[in-house]
Amino acid sequence: MKETHKSRPHRERRGDFEKYLHGSGIDIGGGDDVLVVLNGTVRRWDLEDGDAQLMSGVPDETYDFVYSSHCLEHMRDTEESLRNWVRICKTGGFLYVVVPDYVLYEKLTWPSRFNPDHKQSFSFLVTRQAVARPNHFHVDADLLPLFKRLGIELLAFHVEDNRFNYNFGLADQTQMGALAQLCFIGRKAAAPAAT
């Protein structure tokens, strides 16, 4: 689907490369669509490197930014994955996570009709109670409190729906060049001072 490549012009217009995606970074789950930055380097992390949920062997506080596009929905445990992604991010560094939207991509259907490997779903509209599944994350009710627990200050949240036709029906529009995703950008806060 090449979502990182498709999203690049949108991110350039927003100034995300200057604000967040610079320095030494890692692209978790990058596959053959690895993030390219204007100022810095990006390490690709994929299946052959190890379990993206655990990030074993990657030291704490390693990267200026941790980027992941369309990987978190494949993880067995969202909280453990994010905890380890935050762990390898430097204090003051940026966590930049993109996931498919449950309404736009999954079309309110579970399991996913377009990707049977999706283990989690994410929505800014539909709550966990509405779908009655523990593997569904609502932005306000579930993800924001999780980010706070993990020491991530949310800086920006975007519904990315470029070229998405809301009247098109049930087709997978990402195969036709549309975006159907949610983007979270946060900063790893300094650890609380010891008392």
Image: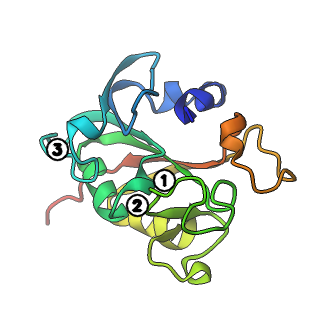
Question: Which residue is disc 3 drawn over?
Answer: 60
User: At x 33% / y 41%, what residue is drawn?
Assistant: 92
Q: Is residue 70 visible?
A: yes
Nearest to N terminus: mark 1 or mark 3: 3
Q: Nearer the viewer, residue 57 or 188?
A: 57
User: At x 72% / y 36%, what residue is drawn?
Assistant: 176
- The residues bearing labels 1 and 3 have C-alpha atoms spaced at a distance of 20 Å
Question: Which residue is disc 2 drawn over?
Answer: 147
Nearest to N terminus: mark 2 or mark 3: 3
Check disc 2 and give the amino acid type.
Phe
User: In what element is the residue under mark 3?
Assistant: loop
Horizontally, residue 41 falls left or right of residue 174, namely: left
User: In what element is the residue under mark 1?
Assistant: strand
Of the 4 image quadrants, the one containing the C terminus is bottom left
- Is residue 164 positioned above or below 3 on the image? below
User: At x 23% / y 49%, what residue is drawn?
Assistant: 87
Check disc 3 and give the amino acid type.
Asp
Residue 79 percent coordinates (x, y): 33, 64
User: At x 21% / y 52%, what residue is drawn?
Assistant: 54
Check disc 1 and give the amino acid type.
Leu
Q: Dot 2, how many residues are within 10 Å of its Cα: few (below 14), some (14-19), or many (20+)?
A: some
Residue 148 percent coordinates (x, y): 39, 63
- Is residue 131 positioned above or below 149 on the image? below
Label of residue 154 in the image: 1
Residue 63 percent coordinates (x, y): 27, 34
Q: Are marks 1 and 3 in contact (CB under 8 Å)?
A: no
Nearest to N terminus: mark 1 or mark 2: 2
User: In what element is the residue under mark 2?
Assistant: helix
